[in-house]
Image: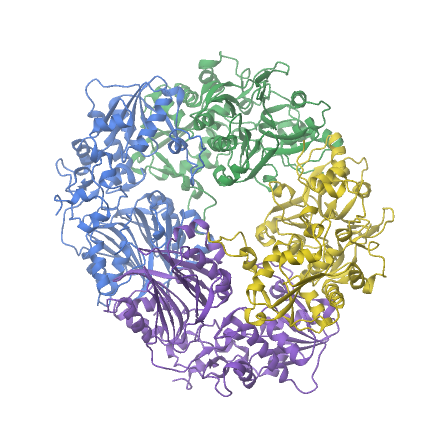
Chain colours: A blue, B green, C purple, D yellow
């Protein structure tokens, strides 16, 4: 029997081709994407003759030293940051993966999650493949290595066609960088230029730091091949419905990024605006407060639309590092308190609207509310800038099992009572549609362009039974999915 | 000849008496004060029989391990975080200092700056004292050690009367904790309770983290002696004018703290309100943006008063650690860019009011403006939530020499041109008075309760010539000051 | 084109089956084998259900912490230390390698060098295998993974039969530990017991530390399978001549180990004895000195046989860690001087026999002689306890190319002049035979039981041309080998 | 009440004046003295204008980086390594100590132990001195600082005259290096030259590494002042009997050093020779074995004199670093086993003479014997190359209390039974005299030139009662000493 550990791939990728300082710029690029993964970081660079790799557990700025970057010589590089998941496979799963095989050397890194990883892996193992990680990237490499084609440009689309699920993937050979995005397009992937060099990144904030210019997105289903001859685009996949991930806009991407063709901050503000519009007539409060920093934009939108004053009622500490030592005589809501502190004299005796972007298990929300309540808030109305999160994501957002998702077990009012607020409201699915569709979607086509499986359970792909079991959420798949 | 290195003492202090986990709570207390000093951290604890010390360079959470805290056994402890200054004396200057002397053991830590340190040191050296640091705390210890009194409670006020300048100081003996604040009261010092234990801290945010209750400030000129017999207060100094530091409110303290009897966030908002009131009639813009995070409150106040929309136009990265590796092909405004990134689609083509809390040398402001300008801002109106900073602070805020202070060399419009903005305005001194005095001061008495020497050059104490030379700002003191 | 980097596998292995603290004992076992590899260390343990791995660059005692060993739960484990080789592949080449494949999980570690690694690798790549390291262990795993057998006990011998060259290899599955030694038996591998547990190790010194009892060697060509059912031995290979490595006795193993059925210290003493016997009649000197510590035994043998006093004329420093900072005004023989210092008053004016175990490039020998000469030695007679090293080793001793081996370019007297000694003598091949064969070999059969390729160039296996080129010693293989 | 922690000062010192790379050479000098102290290391350098300091816990090579040495600019430097003692004061006690005082800056480091430290400290505290360490060096600095002289060259001898006990001390001012050795001369201190530069060091092995030439010892009672004007010697003390420390020769110094005018290796051999001479007639054994490495020389002397073969029967491991992880199922003599392993096939069934240099508590000796016995030794005759250690050392050798010294509680035969040997003999005091006096002392004057207090209890100075109590050996001082 095999181990059932398939950690989700919530990550960031960056690549550059045609720049004398490829590794150093990649290091900065993945630093700008650090919010997408704090567990591990890695870079593979090519000097045209060979690939050199460095990857380790830790933050980008701890993993790379000047001498390391110097060793990663060459004109092309790809880099990766990886989200924190537990367990021993941590380093083995760090990316980019670099291998030698029939056609030479190849490095791959990846953001997303392949839902048919298990059957593919079983098939490959039957053919004699060995696996040193649980990473999807390793599966792709095996598929490519088993291809009889002489050229990787032919082998890559053939391999990718075998995958179902989400991937924004970068491939590096000695003299070629290939960027690919799955046909549904769950995860973002952007294309830019820096002088004569070509850059790709999960989010545009990485372009901003290195001074690159955003050109366009790598489209869902598009494969972009970058060589010294230039950029060549192909679309080898069957046309399919897009399913870009709403959570990239709601929570995951940086507010100063431009993903899926829209500004993240603006999208979040629109969610806040819709949230305010859905309030009962006459509802009001003394102030609107965000759970900083990820909910700042939505709270601002809510405040603008509602006319209730936006206030900085919770201050976030940014020094938090490794585990803190707690006194034996326990401090209430200790971990949350290290991170958040209310502005006591501002909120004491006041009625507050607190805007947050999601409730996962409910435990953190409950602690934040406890802290705010203890600071003297008279009324607390919690508002969530998306619908209840009821189903696990299989497409690259690290999520708990369905049973752990409080939204799958309790109704909003029950959740509100558990968390301890005077009222709790989620943005409706319609509100979400209005907000996100305001400028890029016509009403009614959520599911067409955005994936809302986490709210609706309508997964755009089949989810394999064994995989589902590995996610420890057997009920979800009993009769519904297959 | 001696070295002229007198680093400023911008620091945070925390103390607790009467708690079984004194060291662990002190560790959390100084963690909450981390913004007041990131260079070094230290704790001295007492178990009633002996003092134990640990101090090192680094952040609180790196300096202390669980086993270290266990070794720091006892019911009483004081802790310290120290601001980043350069040079070899760094570790020697880490506090608390702990010594053995005539009356046993004594530990001292300190926030502030003693302006007659040099003559006191010379006097003490004439009497045979040796110095291992450049810290004011060491001077005080020598004064106490040279006292013929049998009791430290008599020796402390005698020693402190010799000091001129700013100090919020904690003393720890085996069975006594003493907290003292200079008669002018430049630096904050708060008194609280945690069950039966007594706590003292630079700011109330430290109380919030450990769950302590703020009781009152240690008053300017007050010495509070804490033993198992309780708290005893004395006021041994000649009455003098208060001179609490405006910069604690403008910039230095955490917005969720309550210092000098007022909420910091509220005070900063009031500065922003006054800043807006001082605009020319008819002045307007598309949005108000803060330089995050320290200017958020003032920007919010400005937006509320002006009616111009508050926006999150600049995103701050919080992963910055040690020095970054820059490509040889330099990136414009590199260091600033690592920290700040504009929300491009929000500000492109817009006229912005950017609110910041101070301009020191002007170089960072210039880079921020450059980045914002490159993101497409049409007009940039920079607003500073205090008057021009023209004079060095000798009372515990780490400042450059007068010559380096751009406000001492150039007029506002010249500074604006240097920085590259369409307009630059500072809050007027009168505006500052209105804001800060709005709830605690009557008009006209700035200087009575708050020290505004950095704006006006009216230092509440004499500044000794040699000291001034050590500050490398000879012109300031030529004939003006003495 | 692929990279030509095939670092030699000079390593140590340890395994244990049937002990509740398998990982901790493995950690101690590889600590005792630390002299066989200081670059990297790793352990894979099994709790009967899954394999857990930890490996990193560094010394054993730095790589493993108590919590790491706790995580490596289970009753069986294998461990590995790796010799220092340069380059980026360092971590990827750390062992044991652990993979998931068709039949579950498998971990492998290895001491030796497979000489047909390149053609095997090419064949495997043709079948779609990918390689993340340059380790022979990975080749073996691929061979096993491509086997259609259902059981690894059948697949292992089939895979090993494909290998030519040297390997002492350990395999770990969830409930099985397999130890295999190549038919020529270059590298040692010992079998022991610790209570009911079975242990295997490169050298018996590892048994001594954990308190295990040496039972016997794993024989050349033997595969030992250890399960809860007991130990099962098989000999699936065609009978072939043994070729155990003389250098294990001359230099590589610890003197307190028992390898190839004999004590290492005793073997080295015998070399020294023969060296003394080969001196010209009437040759004498004031004292015999070893280059400590590896030549101590041979020097003692020389002294006993010659009647010349054994002396401690060179003292070795053991604090050497990472690179040392050298003054700009260079110190003569700096690196060597950090490690060796002569006892000046002992050797001044004396004639010395200095015994060393080998001369590789000649540069270190030259520096040692320079230091000793500067301490006032009147005459220096260098004696080497084996014949001139003239040919690279392809069987697991890390060696320079043939051109770098001073013994392949110069005659003994030329080398002596280069090094700066009054005379230089190597042990003759006959002397070596007498010493090593004294108790286990009949005269004339060197090559039968021991491999002497490094002295004679008579390699027991063909060496593939491409591989030879990768070793950058083209002359060696011109017409002789193929 | 004060803490009773007066750790012994077993250390090494190095100084250099007049060399452009003073700090780097000092770093190498204290590296060569690493065996004298592994706990902490420090350097203070002078560029003629100011002193710069770096000190930290750890080995020399870990404490200093290239950039640290660059910062320690200048032509003069002193350095220090400190022996491992426990406790919190570790870093505070690291040397050199550097202070600012009346006459400028001064740094001091020290090897030895001042026996009237406590009354001096009390006197100084009465005068207002504060102490941050328990180091003797701090006492000397206070004495100098309290001196009314204008010049440190006058103040140093005045201060040193107040000290009783052992000190080899280095002082560094901006333009002067002073080396002083107490009148009894317990600890060594050597003077040498390196081109035009002057060097001082605890042992000559430090000169060898940097390429300096040994000129002579700093004599007992001599103060050597080194400036750009040259070297000036003075002898300001009352003439007194020398009392150089026998243990420097027996155990503490490196065998390749020349201390007290003699080679350490030769002195130890002479001890071994005398030990052999004291055997009963007809006593013999199969071989002589050293407990490596410190007893190698004595064992060699014993073997030469007795005619019994010298053998390498115990192998020492040199990889030992921090604490090792021991299995829960304890391994017999675990800690000792990590360090020592017998050569099993050599000693099995043999009768052994094992030579060691001392027995302190007896516990380690017992474990070594246990290991050797388990390896099959038939007879074990333990021989100690000095008389029984019965009294604590107060002059700079780190020793346990008298009660812990097994030699003070048990007779030799009882100790032998405790340790588990077939016979135990110590070198007699007369044998020691013969050995050490063979070339430098006339018979009968032990105590005149060498201190033998650890064997005889005849301390050359009074030992103060309080100090004795702090050493926790009250019985020693009951009626005997005062």
Residue drawn at point x = 71 percent, y = 68 percent? D302
Task: Name above or below for residue C362 compared with residue A410.
Answer: below
Judged left or right of residue B120, residue C124 is: left
Please state which of residues C171 and A16 is positioned toward the viewer in this rendering: C171
Query: How many callouts does the rendering have?
Result: 0
- Image quarter hosting the N terminus of chain D: top right
Image location (x, y in percent) of residue D103: 75, 38
Residue drawn at point x = 24 percent, y = 51 percent? A167
Image location (x, y in percent) of residue C405: 52, 77
Please state which of residues C299 and C235 is positioned toward the viewer in this rendering: C235
Answer with the quarter of the image where residue C17 lies: bottom left
Please state which of residues D411 and B50 is positioned toward the viewer in this rendering: D411
Residue D104 visible in the snapshot: no
Farthest residue, direction right: D239
Residue C110 visible in the snapshot: yes
- Image quarter hosting the C terminus of chain D: top right
Judged left or right of residue D334, residue B372 is: left
Judged left or right of residue D247, residue C159 is: left
Judged left or right of residue B465, residue A83 is: left
Task: Name above or below for residue D235 compared with residue B293.
Answer: below
Image location (x, y in percent) of residue C142: 30, 67
Farthest residue, direction top: B442
Image location (x, y in percent) of residue C170: 38, 66
């Amino acid at each position: 029997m095999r181990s059932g550990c398939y950690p989700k791939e919530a990550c960031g990728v960056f690549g550059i081709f045609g720049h004398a300082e490829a590794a150093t710029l990649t290091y900065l690029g993945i630093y700008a994407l650090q919010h997408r993964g704090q567990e591990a970081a890695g870079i593979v660079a090519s000097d045209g003759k060979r690939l050199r790799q460095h990857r380790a557990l830790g933050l980008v700025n701890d993993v790379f030293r000047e001498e390391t970057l110097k060793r990663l010589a060459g004109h092309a590089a790809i880099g990766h940051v990886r989200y924190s998941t537990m367990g021993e496979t941590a380093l083995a799963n760090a990316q980019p993966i670099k291998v030698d095989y029939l056609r030479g050397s190849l490095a791959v890194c990846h953001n997303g999650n392949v839902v048919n990883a298990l059957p593919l892996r079983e098939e490959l193992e039957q053919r004699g493949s060995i696996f040193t990680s649980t990473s999807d990237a390793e599966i792709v490499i095996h598929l490519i290595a088993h291809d009889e084609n002489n050229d990787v440009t032919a082998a890559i689309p053939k391999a990718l066609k075998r995958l179902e699920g989400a991937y924004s993937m970068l491939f590096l050979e000695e003299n070629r960088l290939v960027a690919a995005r799955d046909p549904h397009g769950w995860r973002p992937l952007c294309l830019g230029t820096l002088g004569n060099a070509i850059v790709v990144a999960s989010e545009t904030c990485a372009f901003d730091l290195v001074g690159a210019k955003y050109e366009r997105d790598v489209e869902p289903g598009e494969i972009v091949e970058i060589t010294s001859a230039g950029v060549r685009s192909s679309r080898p996949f069957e046309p399919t419905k897009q399913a870009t991930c709403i959570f990239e806009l709601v929570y995951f991407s940086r507010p100063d990024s431009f993903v899926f063709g829209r500004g993240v901050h603006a999208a979040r503000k629109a969610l806040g605006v819709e949230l305010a519009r859905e309030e009962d007539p006459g509802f009001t409060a003394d102030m609107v407060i965000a759970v900083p920093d990820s909910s700042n934009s939505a709270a601002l939108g809510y405040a603008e639309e509602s006319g209730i004053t936006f206030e900085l009622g919770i201050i976030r500490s940014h020094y938090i590092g490794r585990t803190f030592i707690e006194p034996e005589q326990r401090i209430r809501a200790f971990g949350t308190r290290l991170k958040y502190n209310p502005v006591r004299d501002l909120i004491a005796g006041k009625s507050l609207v607190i805007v947050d972007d999601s409730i996962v298990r409910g435990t953190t929300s409950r602690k934040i509310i406890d802290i705010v309540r203890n600071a003297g808030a008279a009324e607390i109305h919690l508002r969530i800038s998306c619908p209840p999160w009821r189903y696990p994501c299989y497409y690259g957002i690290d999520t708990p099992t369905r049973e752990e998702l409080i939204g799958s077990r309790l109704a909003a009012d029950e959740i509100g009572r558990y968390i301890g607020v005077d009222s709790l409201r989620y943005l409706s699915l319609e509100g979400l549609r209005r907000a996100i569709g305001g400028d890029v979607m016509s009403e009614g086509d959520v599911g067409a362009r955005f994936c809302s499986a986490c709210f609706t359970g309508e997964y755009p792909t089949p989810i394999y039974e064994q995989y589902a079991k590995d996610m420890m959420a057997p009920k979800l798949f009993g009769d519904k999915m297959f």
